[in-house]
Amino acid sequence: MTSRRHFITGAAGAMVGASLVSKAGAATIPEAPVQSSPATQPPLHPSNGRPYNPVVTLNGWSLPWRMKDGVKEFHLVAEPVVREIAPGMKANLWGYNGQSPGPTIEVVEGDRVRIFVTNKLPEATTIHWHGQILPSGMDGVAGLVQPAIAPGKTFVYEFVARHAGTFMYHPHSDEMTQMAMGMMGFWVTHPKDPRRHAVDRDFVFLLNAYDIEPGNYTPNVNTMLDFNLWTINSRAFPGTDPMVVRKDDKVRIRMGNLTMTNHPFHIHGHRFEVTGTDGGWIPPAARWPEVTVDIGVGQMRAIEFVADNPGDWAFHCHKSHHTMNAMSHAMPNLIGVDQAGVAKKINDLVPGYMVMGDKGGSMGGMHMALPENTLPMMTGRGPFGDIEMGGMFTVIKVREGLARGDYRDPGWYRHPAGTVAREWTGAVPEAVGAPAAPASGDVIGTAKRGGHEGH
Ligand SMILES: [Cu+2]
């Protein structure tokens, strides 16, 4: 076998399955491509098999395959990886093919799929193909339906991707440790007819959480609920890339939750419908409008909207602690407490001590020294100042005049004149008192009875 490692740089789209075929002989395992960058890679257009509209994995990539005798062959390598959570912080995680999460696997409804899984971890693992309808022995539950894959061993899974939809993969062997270390990946089965469920831009990501103490590099895997890093595809804001869309594009965002709590994801400036789950597509007549969708533990949701409102729109988990990074979630509330005297006394003992929180939690303007390998709690700079966000937060950038398939960051939105909230420097109008209560029987808004029922 030729060199297993095939490093992909910048243009992952250029490295497709076809280039792997010639290198791999008849009886060998296909190469396992490796991704070295945490940046969002361009969509991987299929070079063989049935056509489909590829997805874009936020801060991730899709796994190339080789076609062998009509079967799509993939190779996943479970291994320790170093993942940049955001500039200024790296984590020692476990993942697949160089990153955590692992690469997105994209196939087409009806495809026969063969996946080689090589275990380079120090302990046994398996892969469970979450949501797939497949033979029991391919379901990946260690002990129950297969022996665990020992370190150094390679197993092969094979099944037909029977249903189009939104799925994920993760170990079903020492799950607590392995998922807390970042082992998971996205799976999309595209419809056989690419016109079904067609959208212009289709983004995917997984939600994950880590407990990494400030100054450390490796997650505490015994944490049950009190995680301190809430991440989108193992990236915390401002490390999350924006989702760039063309005005009037039909956009789908597919999200899966492999953390230990639910995440209500909220969109600004648009309304969406939930169009699918990991159980399948939702019939159009059963959908309703939303601006927030709760994604429960072990659930996946696909939302769709028309991006008809240009601007920079926040897209984030609505739990406020989940848009913050590590540090200080358990601090007492000191709003309104004058700490000036206390601060002086502590400063005599601890030079450099800072008063925090007597006017609120804002830390945007404070530039304190952080422990090594730690992100500020609330951070990110925008065109108008500090954004004061972290964790599960990103921005949907809706722009006119983009080319089809152009995902490059267009920079900050240029607001039309007169459309930005501004300081008021004129006279402040007098407070208006509440109007007198209406006379009894005079109810606002009820139609007068008689004569107009037919309208
Ligand atoms: Cu959340």
Image (tube, rainbow, N blue to C red):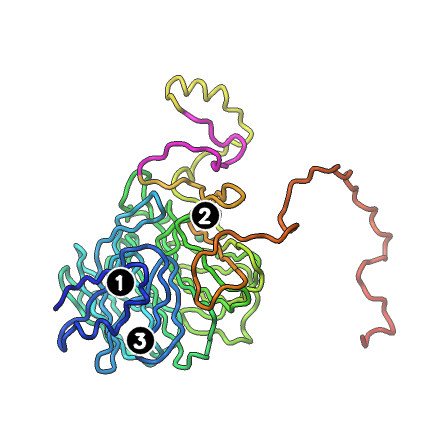
Q: Which residue is tagged 2?
A: 323
Is disc 3 placed on a helix, strand or loop?
loop
Q: Nearer the viewer, mark 2 or mark 1?
A: 2
Q: Which residue is tagged 1?
A: 172
Give x and y (percent) for residue 392.
43, 52
Q: Amino acid at mark 3?
A: Ser
Give x and y (percent) for residue 264.
48, 56
In the rendered view, does 117 fall on the left or right side of 39? left
Residue drawn at 52 percent across, 68 percent down:
249
Q: Name the quadrant containing residue 327.
A: top left
Is disc 1 placed on a helix, strand or loop?
loop
414 part of magenta stretch: no
Give x and y (percent) for residue 227.
37, 47
- The quarter of the picture where the C terminus appears is bottom right
Q: CA distance from mark 3 to mark 1?
A: 32 Å
Q: Name the quadrant containing residue 300.
A: bottom left
Q: Nearer the viewer, mark 2 or mark 3?
A: 3
Q: For the residue carrying disc 1, how many other residues have a C-alpha within 10 Å: few (<14), some (14-19), or many (20+)? A: many
Give x and y (percent) for residue 120.
17, 58
Q: Which residue is tagged 3?
A: 47
Q: CA distance from mark 2 to mark 1?
A: 29 Å
Q: CA distance from mark 2 to mark 3?
A: 39 Å
Question: Is disc 2's CB within 8 Å of ligand 1?
Answer: yes
- Reply above or below: 213 against 207: above
Mark positioned earlier in the residue sequence (2 or 1): 1
